[in-house]
Amino acid sequence: MKTSLLVLVGTGALLGLAACLSCCSFHEEPRCCTFPVPGGYGYAILYQKDTLIKQPYMPAISGRQPFRTVREARAIGELVCRKLRKGHPPTVTPEEVTDRIE
């Protein structure tokens, strides 16, 4: 039963990421797409046809915790995109994450 559930969730995550890549890959600047992961959501940063970042867990937070909602994942993904557009490193601090998800 657990194996079937993991396969189902994994397949759903891959399909979500594939849909995200197909709809976002034609843009000329970095874009953020969210995708489901076991227990929540993650985000991907895409540029043209490349995946620059695939982040299934909250960055800068200890442990492997997925985002609870699409909105949380998108908020941090968009922050990373803004930094990349400005030529800054795509790093975030724990404070930047917690300020946007609480």
Image (spheres, rainbow, N blue to C red):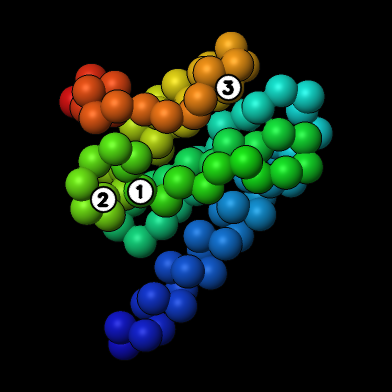
Spot occupied by residue 47 in the image (x, y as percentages of width and height)? 71, 34
Per the image, label 3 sits on a secondary structure element best described as helix
Distance from label 3 to label 1 (Cα)? 19 Å
Distance from label 2 to label 3 (Cα)? 24 Å
Of discs 2 and 3, which sits in the foreground?
3
| Quarter the N terminus occupies | bottom left
The residue at the point 78 percent across, 24 percent down is 28
Spot occupied by residue 76 in the image (x, y as percentages of width and height)? 40, 28
Is 84 in front, or is 102? 84
Q: Can residue 38 be seen in this snapshot? A: yes
Per the image, label 1 sits on a secondary structure element best described as loop
The residue at the point 27 percent across, 54 percent down is 64
Query: Seen in the image, is 24 located left or right of residue 42?
Result: right
Q: Earlier in the sequence, mark 2 or mark 3?
A: 2
Which residue lies under the disc numbered 2? 65
Decide: few, some or many residues near mark 2? Use Cα within 10 Å; few <14, some 14-19, many ≥20: some
Distance from label 2 to label 1 (Cα)? 5 Å
Q: Which mark is residue 57?
A: 1
Query: Seen in the image, is 60 located left or right of residue 26?
Result: left
> Which amino acid, mark 1?
Tyr
Task: Evaluate if marks 2 and 1 touch, with contact meaning CB atoms under 8 Å apart.
Answer: yes
> Which amino acid, mark 3?
Leu
Q: Earlier in the sequence, mark 3 or mark 1?
A: 1
Is 17 in front, or is 90? 90
Which residue lies under the disc numbered 3? 84
Decide: few, some or many residues near mark 1? Use Cα within 10 Å; few <14, some 14-19, many ≥20: many
